[in-house]
Amino acid sequence: MSEIRLNPITREWVIIAKEKDKKPEDFIIVKENRKPPELLKTCPFCPGNETVTPKETFKICDEKGWKIRVVPNKFAVLSNEGERARSHTELHKNVNGVGTHEVIIETPIHNLTTATMPLEQFKRGYPGLQRSLP
């Protein structure tokens, strides 16, 4: 089981997933210079593939369809089951990794990133920022 650990230097809580021991070099990285398409039939996060992901816990829609979806993570490092048990060693304060792990799909457009997202879409996903953004 993963655990939530207090970083004694930054005083921030971080998730330690001991069973997720893959390193970046364990994954095959294919670099291509071409821009990916807006929609992919094989992408579980693209419109039309909603049945491939768990049922959303939240979504924002308009007349054209969903704009933002939140779904449970199929490969969660936190578990909804179990009891939150705290422990304390000389170096660490720990809590069992009990909690919710969700994926926020910020746009239905596959090749759109937060950096290239139109301001209106960004504001829609982060309504608290609407007061501070132009």
Image (cartoon, grey):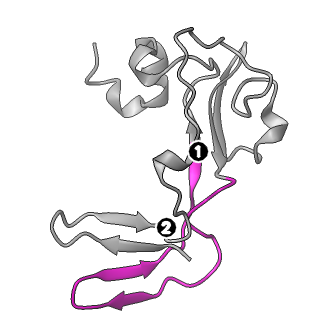
Q: Overall secondary structure of the magenta stretch? A: loop
Position above or below: 50 against 122? below
Q: Per the image, is 12 magenta?
A: no
Residue on which disc 2 sits: 17
* Element at label 1: strand
Q: Front-most of 119 and 11? A: 11
Quadrant housing the N terminus: bottom right
* Element at label 2: loop
Percent across and percent down for residue 99 are 54, 68
Residue extent of the magenta highlight: 74-103
Position above or below: 74 against 60? below
Quadrant housing the C terminus: top left
Which mark, by number, is residue 71? Answer: none
Query: Comparing marks 1 and 2, which lies closer to the viewer?
Result: 2
Please state which amino acid type lies under the numbered disc 1.
Val
Q: Front-most of 91 and 84? A: 91
Quadrant of residue 91 in the image? Answer: bottom left
The CA span between labels 1 and 2 is 17 Å
Choose the circle earlier in sequence order: 1 or 2: 2
- Residue most toward the left? 9
Quadrant of residue 103 in the image? Answer: top right
Q: Residue at x 66, y 11 (%)?
A: 37
Which mark, by number, is residue 103? Answer: 1
Q: Residue at x 65, y 12 (%)?
A: 38
Percent across and percent down for residue 104 are 56, 39
Position above or below: 68 against 37? below
Q: Residue at x 80, y 30 (%)?
A: 49
Q: Name the side, left or right, on which 89 lies relative to 72.
A: left
Q: Per the image, is 75 magenta?
A: yes
Please state which amino acid type lies under the numbered disc 2.
Ala
